[in-house]
Image (cartoon, rainbow, N blue to C red):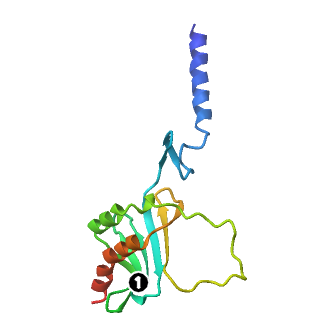
Amino acid sequence: MKKFISLVVIGMCLLSLFGCLKKPFGKNDPFILDGPGMVYEPTWESFSISQTSDYSNDLFWFTVTDHYKTPTVIGECRDQSGTVYKAEEGIPLTFQTIADLRDLQIEDLNDVVPSSEGFDEEEPEILDGNVITLTFVAENGFEYEKVIDYETAMKIHSILLPYFVASNQ
């Protein structure tokens, strides 16, 4: 009986060792399935947004990084009078500002779907109008490009603009 129990214990130890050789669940998977029809969207660790526009006051770019100890923003933007503000070194953000940015839930926006046609060099390039790009890096290290509307982009602008104004005074 002791031999049988010893063999079972050795077998369980070997099975547990070989079970650990498998890739950890969700470690390198950008989507962790929670259940039928459920997908976990990881939250952002940093994001970059840029907007080009016919209206010069709507031209801006920001990169926000949340390292939990010192969240920062760099970028370039304009106020309503057209004054340009730049920050190449990180401007510290308050935790309330990070909470306001997280309340926008940019990770829940639709993913950008790449065009199947590709770039045609003979097609003229459209140089006017609004073009907004949003990319964020999630906690899992994956990068996501999202579709963002003008109103949400301008909310981000209005949240971050006071930091640029204050840093240039």
Residue 75: image location, x then y, percent: 42, 81
The residue that label 1 is drawn on is 58
Say if 57 sits above or below 70 in the image: below
Looking at the rendered image, the quarter that the C terminus falls into is: bottom left
Residue shown at the point (66%, 84%) measured from the top left: 124
Q: Which one is in front, 110 or 95?
A: 110
Is 6 on the left-hand or right-hand side of 130?
right
Residue 133: image location, x then y, percent: 50, 73
| Label 1 Cα crowd, 10 Å radius (few <14 / some 14-19 / many 20+) | many
Residue shown at the point (46%, 74%) measured from the top left: 49
Is 65 on the left-hand or right-hand side of 23?
left
Q: Which one is in front, 4 or 167?
A: 167
Is 132 on the left-hand or right-hand side of 68?
right
Residue shown at the point (51%, 46%) measured from the top left: 32
Say if 76 sits above or below 42 in the image: below
Residue 51: image location, x then y, percent: 46, 79
Q: Name the amino acid, label 1.
A: Asp
Looking at the rendered image, the quarter that the N terminus falls into is: top right
